[in-house]
């Protein structure tokens, strides 16, 4: 059995207000996370009903229930993909194969065929992105797509160890794609993070599990704020060097010193600079 990384995008109320819960699911050997047109997903999800339409692009194979929807969502996938690659600075990275994206008719079909809980607004399994039509689709797509790219670029082992960064860049890209998410996380940073920021030593080592919603929101909001700050203040090229050093096994401090020479030497330097920005 292989263990493939899975993420769930969580939606609160009718807005695309989210947090993500990382997990691993056991799936059969050879599971590719997606399905060819007309063939159902292997476990853990069932595919769309017969008659769905499929749109193929340079990096995606997207299925939805109408030609107009499949074309629209495929274009949105490429738009998100381009922005993610630019922000993370990993222009030369080429995924091993196109990502498979399924857009279910609604939340009810999504939950029935994926087995996801009621609060889930989207999920990423290995090479597949599972979504459903609704107001939270744009935010869920950006968030989960970032996980797909990050996991493949970094490798699952490193991606799992660097959950703060994995979730941080996903929150940042989600905020870049959705005005609702931008407003939600800006409010959380202002009301929950700035008055009581999580020390970076805790942020990078203790991902929240089972704590109160307020605590979890605070962790995700701060992780997204820190990742976004490193991308903006240090530049996308240096951020790509930072990721590459981490992927090669460097510690966070070693990766920062190597990638951000002359700007920051260690995580504590990033923490001080970030605090100055958010508390202005």
Image (spheres, rainbow, N blue to C red):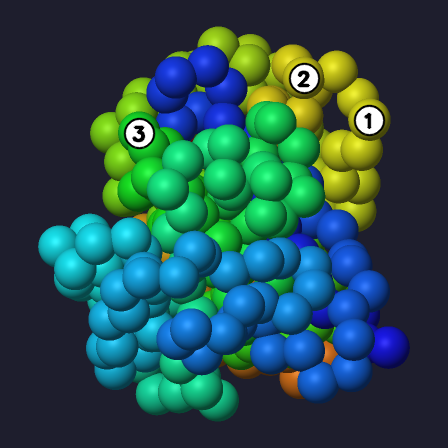
Residue closer to the observer: 213 or 199: 213
Q: Please identify the residue farthest to the left as the structure is shown.
A: 68
The reply to whether discs 1 and 3 touch (Cβ–Cβ < 8 Å) is no
Vertical placement of residue 172 versus 190, above or below: below
Residue 210's mark? 1
Mark closest to the chain's N terminus, 2 or 3: 3
> Can residue 255 be seen here?
no
The N terminus appears in which quarter of the rendering?
bottom right
Q: Position of residue 147 (x, y in %)?
A: 53, 59
Residue closer to the observer: 262 or 126: 126
Residue position marked by numbered label 3 in the rendering: 135
Residue position marked by numbered label 2 in the rendering: 213
Kindly identify the residue that appears in the image at 79 percent across and 22 percent down. Answer: 211
The C terminus appears in which quarter of the rendering?
top left
* 53 displayed left or right of 238: left
Kindly identify the residue that appears in the image at 37 percent across and 20 percent down. Answer: 15
Kindly identify the residue that appears in the image at 42 percent across and 73 percent down. Answer: 38
Mark closest to the chain's N terminus, 1 or 3: 3
| Crowd band around label 3 with a 10 angstrom C-alpha radius: few (<14), some (14–19), many (20+) | some
> Foreground mark, 1 or 3?
3
Quote the CA–CA distance across marks 1 and 2: 8 Å
């Amino acid at each position: 059995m292989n263990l493939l990384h899975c993420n769930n995008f969580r939606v609160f109320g009718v807005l695309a207000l989210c947090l993500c819960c990382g997990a691993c699911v056991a799936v059969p050997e050879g599971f590719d996370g997606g399905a060819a047109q007309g063939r159902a997903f292997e476990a853990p999800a069932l595919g769309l009903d017969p008659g769905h339409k499929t749109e193929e692009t340079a990096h995606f194979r997207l299925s939805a229930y109408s030609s107009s929807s499949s074309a629209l969502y495929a274009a949105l996938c490429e738009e998100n993909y381009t922005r993610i690659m630019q922000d993370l600075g990993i222009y030369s990275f080429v995924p091993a194969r196109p990502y498979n994206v399924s857009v279910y008719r609604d939340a009810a079909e999504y939950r029935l065929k994926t087995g996801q809980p009621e609060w889930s607004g989207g999920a990423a399994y290995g090479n597949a992105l599972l979504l459903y039509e609704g107001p939270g689709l744009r935010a869920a797509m950006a968030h989960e797509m970032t996980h797909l790219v990050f996991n493949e670029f970094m490798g699952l082992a490193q991606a799992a160890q660097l959950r703060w960064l994995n979730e941080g860049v996903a929150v940042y890209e989600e905020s870049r794609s959705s005005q609702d998410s931008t407003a939600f996380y800006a409010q959380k940073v202002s009301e929950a993070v700035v008055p009581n920021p999580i020390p970076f030593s805790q942020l990078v080592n203790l991902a929240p599990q089972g704590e109160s919603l307020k605590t979890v929101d605070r962790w995700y909001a701060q992780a997204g704020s820190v990742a976004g700050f490193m991308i903006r203040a240090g530049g996308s090229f240096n951020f790509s060097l930072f990721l590459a050093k981490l992927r090669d096994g460097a510690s966070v401090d070693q990766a920062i010193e190597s990638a951000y020479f002359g700007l920051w030497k260690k995580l504590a330097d990033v923490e001080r600079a970030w605090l100055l920005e958010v508390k202005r």
